[in-house]
Amino acid sequence: MGYKESTYQHWVSLDIQQPVWGHVFTVAPLVVIGTKEGNHYDLAPKHMVTPLGLRNYFGFVCTPAHATYHNVQKEKAFTVSFIRPNQIVLASLAATPRCGLEIEEKSVVQALPTMAASSVDALFLRDSYFLLECKLEKIVDGFGGYSLIGGQIIAAHIHEEDARYSEKDDAQLIYQNPLLAYLADGRFSEIRHTYEFPFPKDFVAQPKENTPDD
């Protein structure tokens, strides 16, 4: 490869026969996915989430071992609540049914502050700052027992205090309305101080596409 032998003298090579992610912290969002489950509703925190391109598509990683996977597969829809730092305990409570405790699963969701979505039959975690309603686009299985669930955003809502406008200073907006960062795996942080990214001259961060959506 042309590298000198000393290139990796300060690096630790990991055994890739085992998952590598527990050896280092990485930064991710933390959202709560809402689904319909029979005659009830389910909420589940997820951090392996991402926009799928610059259009209105959103995806998250799940596993068939969790109810969320089967709920989306059956109902063809889900919601996404981007939560605030002060909602971290609520997100933790939403994960309670997965802990193997002797607890009535739906009673946990019923105890959480929620609100109904407008276009799909599912719930949001109330007081979140960014809300997405998605219809299932496709599920891609086969990632070592995990799956990528992709949806098309059919409705979106943002709290007026968190909306970006040209007359608002982005740094001040984030300082006044801090963002939640999940440090996988097992820690979180509140982001208040941010800096403008030093893009090269004439670089377009989000180019406009002329091709209409399918």
Image (cartoon, rainbow, N blue to C red):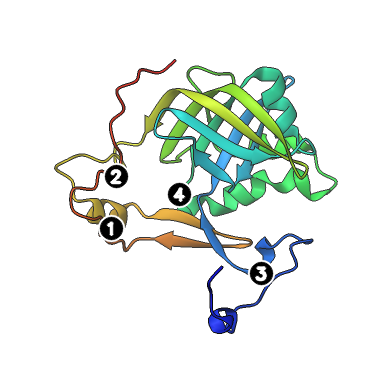
Disc 1: which residue: 197
Tag 4: amino acid: Arg
List the single residue furthest toward the front.
Answer: 2
Q: CA distance from mark 2 to mark 1?
A: 10 Å
Which residue is at 29% across, 58% downward? 175
Tag 3: amino acid: His
Tag 2: amino acid: Ala
Disc 3: which residue: 23
* Label 1: element kind: loop
Q: CA distance from mark 1 to mark 3?
A: 28 Å
The crowd level at tag 1 (other Cα within 10 Å; few <14, some 14-19, many 20+) is: few
The answer to whether residue 212 is left or right of residue 165 is right
Q: Are marks 2 and 1 in contact (CB under 8 Å)?
A: yes
Dividing the image into 4 quarters, which one contains the C terminus? top left
Q: Earlier in the sequence, mark 2 or mark 1?
A: 1
Tag 1: amino acid: Phe
* Label 3: element kind: helix
Disc 2: which residue: 205
Which numbered mark, 3 or 2, is in the foreground of this view? 2
Disc 4: which residue: 84
Q: Earlier in the sequence, mark 3 or mark 4?
A: 3
Dividing the image into 4 quarters, which one contains the N terminus? bottom right
Q: CA distance from mark 3 to mark 2?
A: 31 Å
- In the image, residue 10 sits, relative to residue 1, either above or below, namely below
Which numbered mark, 1 or 4, is in the foreground of this view? 1
* Label 4: element kind: loop
Question: In terms of image quadrants, where is residue 199?
Answer: bottom left
